[in-house]
Image (tube, rainbow, N blue to C red):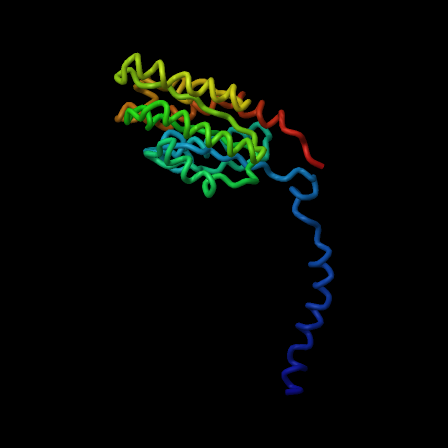
Amino acid sequence: MGFVVQRFQPVLALLTLLLPLVISSPAPAQEETGAPQRQIVAFGDSLSAGYGVGPGESFPEQLQAALREEGYDVTVTNAGVSGDTTSGGLSRLDWSVPENADLVIVELGANDALRGVDPKITRENLSKILEQLNERGQTVILAGMLAPPNMGEDYAERFNPIFPELAEKYDVTFYPFFLEGVAAEADLNQADKMHPNAEGVGVIVDNIMPTVTEALDSQPTEG
């Protein structure tokens, strides 16, 4: 037994020397600056989830890259679910969007319109989503959506105003149309003519960037 102790004495001596250094090691640079990385959540459907595009090409990934290039220390989480309606979004809000997220981009409603969901239901669901996020005190960007032409004028007149009216009611930032500059542009969409390709996602990111950076800049700084 004495042989074993003697054998490991050099190792124990080395650990004794290193332990104070480990304990006193400086915190990561992020903590030193007192400016923790901000968390953004893209909460939506296939349009923001990255349906049909490759790694690094989805909306959250391209937005994160663009913001970091502009000097924003952020992580953009992909909380998009393909095929999700506003009903689906509402049902998963609690576990899809953490309460510590600094900014939530709500992009829902396209599938409601495609399925002909009663606009009254869409309005009620989005109202509850915005109400919950407001109660948490989170910064929100509500991305608008437009009803497809084949749904008819009556449907569009009931559906399209939902987004600007709710943005005003809940005092959140409103981005009028998530697919601005991309919808109906063949070279910016996939073969299904509904989902943006990687280049189309890039256009969406370029268009929404000023809205996102303004929302981030308006937040109080810590430290």
Q: Quadrant of residue 197?
A: top left
Q: Position of residue 159 (x, y in %)?
A: 36, 19
The residue positioned farthest toward the top in the image shown: 153
Left or right relative to 179: residue 13: right
Left or right relative to 107: residue 187: left
- In the image, residue 14 sits, relative to residue 132, either above or below, namely below
> Residue at 46% of width from left, 33% of height from top?
42
Q: Position of residue 158 (x, y in %)?
A: 36, 17
Left or right relative to 27: residue 182: left
> Residue at 58% of width from left, 36% of height from top?
38
Of the 4 image quadrants, the one containing the N terminus is: bottom right
How many badges with numbers are in the image? 0
Of the 4 image quadrants, the one containing the C terminus is: top right
Q: Position of residue 49 (x, y in %)?
A: 39, 34
Note whether residue 193 is visible: yes
Q: Quadrant of residue 47?
A: top left
> Residue at 42% of width from left, 22% of height from top?
178
Note whether residue 207 is visible: no
Q: Position of residue 181 (x, y in %)?
A: 40, 17
Name the residue nearer the viewer: 162 or 217.
162
